[in-house]
Image (spheres, helix red, strand yellow):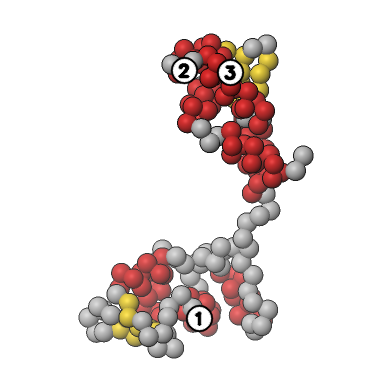
């Protein structure tokens, strides 16, 4: 079966607060339709209608009038949707080989920095990568600079200081205003 209809069926099945309540109850253990109706204070015919949709979508299975949450099917569906579909960071082809190598080494697949390099040349390459997040002719507060840098790495102070020290950003002496110069 094609994955797209499976996920669409799952999303439709889960798009009801009552069905979510039923799934929540079944996550605690197997139940008969009458038990579900009683515990949730729902009309039995409504419970049966919801259970039919949950069963059709594969979220719930039924055997001899007892309903179970189909955890394996849900897990399989989730794995199938995300398997092999992560964004992968790939340096641009027109970059020099040493730049590509440093970016592959120090960046995670989502473009965040795995580890800050200690060596000057490698740090310079990482700073050049980060610099694209800053616009020319824009003044930034220190808080705005930190917010941008946090997208790349939690150590915003080191990145901010290096951007200034390497001449990519300049700032007022009191640190109230930053701007891109390179």
Q: Position of residue 56 (x, y in %)?
A: 67, 28
Q: Report how far apart the C-alphas of labels 2 and 1 lie in the structure.
A: 60 Å
Mark earlier in primary sequence (3, 2): 2
Q: Tell me if label 2 and label 1 are in contact, CB under 8 Å.
A: no
Q: Report how far apart the C-alphas of labels 3 and 2 lie in the structure.
A: 10 Å
Which residue matches tag 1? Answer: 128
Q: Is residue 158 above or below residue 121?
A: above
Which of 12 and 23 lies nearest the eye of the viewer? 12
Residue found at the far left of this picture: 174
Which residue matches tag 2? Answer: 42
Q: Is residue 118 above or below residue 60?
A: below
Q: Within the image, what quadrant is residue 135 found in?
A: bottom left
Q: Is 82 situated left or right of 160 in this image?
A: right
Which residue matches tag 3? Answer: 48
Callout 1: helix, strand or loop? helix
Residue drawn at point x = 37 percent, y = 67 percent: 147
Q: Is 127 situated left or right of 6 in this image?
A: left
Mark earlier in primary sequence (1, 3): 3
**Whether residue 24 is visible:** no
Q: Report how far apart the C-alphas of labels 1 and 3 lie in the structure.
A: 60 Å
Residue drawn at point x = 61 percent, y = 67 percent: 89
Q: Tell me if label 3 and label 2 are in contact, CB under 8 Å.
A: no
Q: Nearer the viewer, mark 2 or mark 1?
A: 2
Q: Is 163 situated left or right of 10 in this image?
A: left
Which of 89 and 81 lies nearest the eye of the viewer? 81
Which of 105 and 67 lies nearest the eye of the viewer? 67
Q: Within the image, what quadrant is residue 91 found in?
A: bottom right
């Amino acid at each position: 079966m094609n994955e797209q209809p499976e996920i669409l069926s799952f999303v439709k099945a889960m798009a009801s607060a009552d069905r979510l309540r039923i799934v929540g109850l079944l996550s605690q253990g197997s139940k008969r339709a009458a038990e579900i109706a009683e515990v949730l204070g729902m009309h039995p015919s409504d419970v049966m209608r919801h259970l039919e949709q949950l069963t059709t979508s594969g979220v719930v299975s039924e055997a001899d009038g007892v309903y179970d949450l189909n955890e394996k099917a849900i897990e399989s569906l989730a794995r199938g949707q995300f398997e092999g579909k992560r964004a992968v960071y790939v340096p641009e082809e027109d970059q020099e080989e040493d730049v590509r190598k440093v970016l592959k080494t120090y960046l995670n697949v989502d473009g965040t920095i795995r580890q800050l390099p200690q060596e000057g040349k490698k740090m310079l390459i990482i700073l050049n990568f980060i610099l694209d997040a800053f616009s020319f002719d824009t003044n930034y507060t220190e808080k705005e600079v930190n917010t941008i840098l946090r997208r790349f790495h939690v150590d915003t102070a080191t990145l901010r200081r290096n951007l200034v020290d390497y001449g990519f950003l300049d700032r007022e002496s009191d640190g109230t205003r930053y701007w891109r110069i390179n």
